[in-house]
Image (tube, helix red, strand yellow):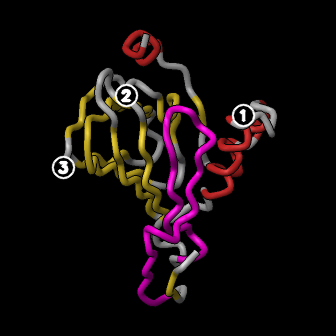
Amino acid sequence: MDTDTTATGPLLVRASAAEILTGDPGGTIALLADSATTGGAITCNRSTFRARADGAPPHFHTRASELFVVLGGRLQVLVDDRVHVLDRGDVLLVPPRVPHAFGAVAGVDADVLVVFTPGMDRFDYYRLLDRVHRGEADPREIGESQERFDNHYVDSPLWRETRS
């Protein structure tokens, strides 16, 4: 990856040099900055979702807030017990312990910048998801990694109904 960084100095990540995960038929994830390269300040990725594709099932994080910036298209998001539709230019911050889920709306792709603060070591989580989509890892590994990646899955009848 073409980056210029120190743990306490500026960080430059060239989009052209980002690791792109393509195993999910519903979209891609560009890995931009992880906790290790930002001195723990942030973790950042750019995700694209094809129309109606799910991004993540209902879950919460105990240690980090998750910021969504919609760069293009429309993103449907569950936040606690409400569903919102975010349009291009919208920003949503989900604090720790608040259940949330997201995916592209029907008929429209979504291009989203996702930032965790403080940073979390998430790149290996995304790589695990990519391997599961490719059939190279067992989906049970995702559930077994909840503590390691601070990604705690929850049930949401509202989200199931909204996305069905």
Q: CA distance from mark 2 to mark 1?
A: 26 Å
x and y percentages locating residue 148 in the rendered image: 71, 51
Q: Is residue 82 visible?
A: no
Q: Which mark is residue 60?
A: none
Q: Which mark is residue 89?
A: 3
Q: Is residue 84 above or below residue 124?
A: above
Badge 2 amino acid: Ala
The N terminus sits in image quarter: bottom right
Badge 3 amino acid: Gly
Describe residue 107's horizontal placement relative to residue 155 as left or right.
left
Residue positioned 48% across, 35% down in the render:
55
According to the image, label 1 marks what residue?
143
Q: Nearer the viewer, mark 2 or mark 1?
A: 2
Badge 1 amino acid: Gly
Within 10 angstroms of label 1, few (less than 14), some, or many (20 or more) residues? few
According to the image, label 2 marks what residue?
51
Q: Nearer the viewer, residue 66 or 46?
A: 46
Residue positioned 62% across, 49% down in the render:
126
x and y percentages locating residue 121 in the rendered image: 62, 61
Q: SS at mark 3?
A: loop
Q: SS at mark 2?
A: loop
Describe residue 69's horizontal placement relative to residue 157 as left or right.
left
Describe residue 83's horizontal placement relative to residue 134 as left or right.
left
| Of callouts 2 and 1, the N-terminal one | 2
**Residue most toward the front?**
16
Q: Is residue 164 above or below residue 121?
A: above
Q: Nearer the viewer, residue 52 or 158?
A: 52
Q: Which residues are magenta?
A: 8-37
